[in-house]
Image (spheres, grey):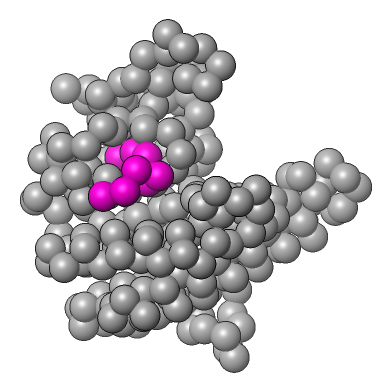
Amino acid sequence: MPHSRFKRVLLKLSGEVLMGEQQFGIDPSYVARLAEEVKAAKDTGLEVCLVIGGGNIFRGISGAAKGLDRTTGDYMGMLATVMNALAMQNALEKAGVQTRVQSAIPMASVCEPYIRRRAERHLEKGRVVIFAAGTGNPFFTTDTGAALRAAEMGCDALFKGTSVDGVYDCDPKKFPDATRFETITYSKVLSDNLKVMDAAAVALCRENNIPIVVFSIREKGNLAHVLAGNGIQTTVQEEAE
Ligand code: UDP
């Protein structure tokens, strides 16, 4: 599927990709590599919104498993996404890309609050906008935050860069004969409970007709290939082609 018709996209990166080869946290050299890929995408004339997860630092659900209140854990997880957003902003600006971070949880000394019209203006001026703190609410994920911002900002597609190169009929890490879909409908993802994004995110994209492109960001240069419609990926959309 050629993506050249897209004007504005939202790129969602799982927190875990910021770890590079580490087991935890942020690897600045890997973040710098990701920033170069985002810059290359922007240099093609695309308007780029970014949402970064927090799973490399903290997930509310794992805190809850160890006895923390789920809501407290979720707020901690949202704060983790702000740290990742700042790391990515730093890397992008070092690469010469003007970037603004907007957080769903206001923290005036650190970044801007989320204001849609202001984000719109940043994009018009050619800046990358990183939306931090997910939806700002516990019991959600940054995937849902990404779907929400993609809908609000009128993005043409949501690109989900992760460690897996698409959507499979079963877990490719456990089952070597798992088959990757080229395209798949939102409804099949939901009915088969396929692990692409959480159901709320998929439903929001379906309602707003935003295609979800799942691809591996771990291979160098893959974002550019996928944006050009060439790379290995799965597109979740209304009608499978
Ligand atoms: N989170 C939340 N509400 C949101 C977005 C995120 O409570 O709208 C919390 C939640 O605890 C989640 C954590 O932040 O586990 C990190 O986000 P996520 O797990 O989506 O990160 P990723 O898996 O993409 O790295």
The image quadrant that residue 152 belongs to is bottom left
Q: Is residue 214 magenta?
A: yes
Residue at point 66%, 53% (across, down): 24
Q: Name the foreground residue: 223 vs 11.
A: 223
Q: Name the foreground residue: 71 vs 81.
A: 81
Q: Is residue 63 magenta?
A: no
Residue at point 36%, 14% (across, down): 179
Q: Quadrant of the C terminus?
A: top left
Residue 108 appearing in the image: yes
Residue at point 22%, 43% (across, down): 226
Residue at point 51%, 75% (across, down): 86
Q: Quadrant of the N terminus?
A: top left
In percent of width and height, residue 7 lies at 15, 60
Residue 150 appearing in the image: no
Q: Can you name the residue that lies furthest to the bottom here? A: 109
Left or right, 212 with reference to 111: left
Left or right, 72 with reference to 122: right
The image quadrant that residue 15 belongs to is bottom right
The image quadrant that residue 216 belongs to is top left
In percent of width and height, residue 97 lies at 29, 78
Q: Which residues are magenta?
A: 212-221
Q: In the rendered image of this protein, does residue 151 appear above or below residue 87? A: above
Q: Can you name the residue that lies furthest to the top here? A: 177
In percent of width and height, residue 161 lies at 39, 46
